[in-house]
Image: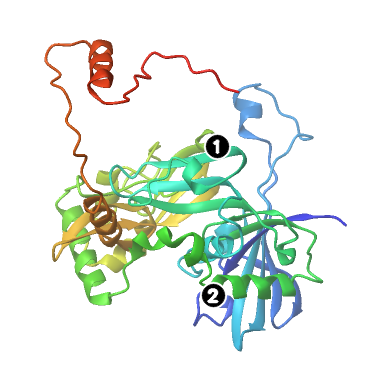
Amino acid sequence: MTKNNITIYLIKEGITSFNDIIKDARILKSYDSDTVAYYSPSDERQPKWLKDFFQINNEGLLTSNARAILLKRIEVADEKRIFALTFGYGKTLLKENVYEEQFGLKIVLNTIAPNKIRKISKIDIGKNYKQSQEQMPKESDISDFGFDIERDLIKRITGKCDDTAFEGANITGGDTLSIYSDKNITNIENLLRECYVKYKDTAYKQSFEWIDNIKMEKDQNDIDKLNAMVVDKLNSRNFADIWLAIPEVINWEKIKRIYISGQKDRDAEYLDIDNEAFVESFGNSKILHYDQIKGKTISAKSTEDGKTDIVRWSADKCLVGSLELDNAVYAINGGHWYKISHDFAKEINDAYKKIPLCTMDFIDCADRLEKDYNEQLAKSFENGHNLDRTKIPIG
């Protein structure tokens, strides 16, 4: 049976109308009131490099960016939820902030064994907000990756799934779930139901309990205070604590420029997010409230024509940095605030303090060379042995 690359989003609870999810799209096919496919017409054109580099025209050589998305409403676990399946550049047809974050990540963590990980994408929110991807040549444990469970935040994870519902495939989870599957429009519903069941599960706490060391802040009062601090930092051009950066790993070779909605120079070719230009894009007045940041978009334009969006984000998703509030440290990433948990560090420190200190007497190092000191130290102990610079046969 033919297999398809399927990318699945879960639309946020409370959004019930397809019109509140889709933008700038036409109906491709309406299967019923709960299942509708949308598309954006492809703009066929000669690739820009054909004329710029080869300096020729050829109407037989065309390119286009296909965009399609399927919205499907199903009843699962006594709830009605909407799923979005994107194809090509279909993500750009979604309105901002309409899908659940970490939907796919929770599915993967609730589905794969801890030693079945192949690839992780992470961001260091405890230091420099470095984004990185690591891939192993074989299925591995999280400990085999360069992952710091106290300050690294998992963005995406790929692993081998033995669950028959997911066809024993490698699945990737972040905000979306990506799977190579034999499902199509006629039989996708059961897979979506299983996705939702796994999303709601908490089995991940048995093998991946460290995932909660960095917890998303839920207290709206604290969030409002932090958001107000962000506005003040940006208005004062204090980009040391809070600034904007590309929020995901992207293919820079396909990106011609970064565009900020409302930027003063509409044709400026910023090669990254220019923080000064971002603040100036609000006009002569200062940023008045945080919702203005959420309402602004930042897009990466294609090298093909400098106009087509390869990917687009609401500006709040691009904010990074950390702030202190009430003696606690909060980091912002992907439009969410995370409270850095000190419980785990305290647990490690308490365990360390319980380890008895060594009571052995060591000879004075004085001015001895290391090799000489090791020899003398071994001789100072009864039945002591010096293994330094010693070849030990194996087998």
Q: Is residue 288 above or below residue 363?
A: below
Query: Residue 280: x and y, percent?
Result: 25, 50
Picture coordinates of residue 163 (x, y %)?
A: 70, 63
Q: Nearer the viewer, residue 37 or 216?
A: 216
| Residue named by callout 1 | 254
Residue occupying the point 61% across, 51% down: 159
194 or 349: which is nearer to us? 349
The label on residue 200 is 2
- Residue type pointed to by label 2: Lys
- What colour scheme does the image use? rainbow
Q: Quick one: SS at disc 2?
A: helix
Spot occupied by residue 391 in the image (x, y as percentages of width and height)? 47, 14
Question: Taking 21 as reference, is 358 left or right?
Answer: left
State which quarter of the image contains the N terminus.
Answer: bottom right
Q: Quadrant of the C terminus?
A: top right
Q: Is residue 95 visible?
A: yes
User: Of residues 26 and 192, which is closer to you in this image?
Assistant: 192
In-image side of 327 versus 18 (left or right): left
Three-letter residue code for mark 1? Lys
Q: CA distance from mark 2 to mark 1?
A: 36 Å
Residue at figure coordinates x 14%, y 52% from the top left: 236
Label 1: state its secondary structure.
helix
- Percent x, y of residue 178: 64, 57
| Mark closer to the chain start, 2 or 1 | 2
